[in-house]
Image: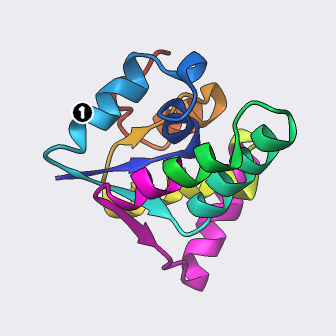
Amino acid sequence: MAFVLDASVTMGWCFADEADHVTDAALDRLRTERAIVPGLWALEVVNVLLVAERRGRIEPAGSARFLELLRGLPIEEDWDLPLDQAAALFDVARRYRLSAYDATYVVLAARRGLGLATKDVRLAEAARGEGVALLHSPF
């Protein structure tokens, strides 16, 4: 089994003040399941770490350790965004007033028939609206 993992949940594994039952449950699921992430997920993770470093929230060594931890988890990147999926991406982003980046998670989950692990309220609403199950949702 698998589920789609977004960056909001992922970063809860790095920053204790962002951890909650959703982040814990997703990490627990990785013991027996794999997570699927869109290709842009790694860029989002790196960007959050860079901003956190600039704000003094994490040291470069901490960022490196976190990235190493992620490499050891069963996370599969999905780089497949055929042109017909781009149309779906526009539709979801417009309908729910999401960025194209956030809509990518919903479209990926819908295309693969998987649930979505997110802490983002708007992303959760879009997922529900598109018939995508939310995993351990706080909403």
Q: Residue furthest bottom?
A: 83
Task: Give x and y (percent) for residue 116.
Answer: 41, 42
| Residue depicted at x 57% and y 45% | 7
Residue 138 in view here: yes
Q: What SS does tag 1 mark?
A: helix
Residue bearing the label numbered 1: 28
Task: Give x and y (percent) for residue 109.
Answer: 41, 54
Along the line of sight, the residue nearer the viewer: 38 or 64: 64
How many numbered circles are shown? 1
Along the line of sight, the residue nearer the viewer: 56 or 105: 56
In which quadrant of the rendered view does residue 113 lie? bottom left
| Magenta span: chief secondary structure | helix
Determine whether 37 is above or below 63 in the image: below
**Which amino acid type is shown beneath numbered disc 1?**
Asp
Segment colored magenta: 66-95
| Residue depicted at x 50% and y 77% | 79
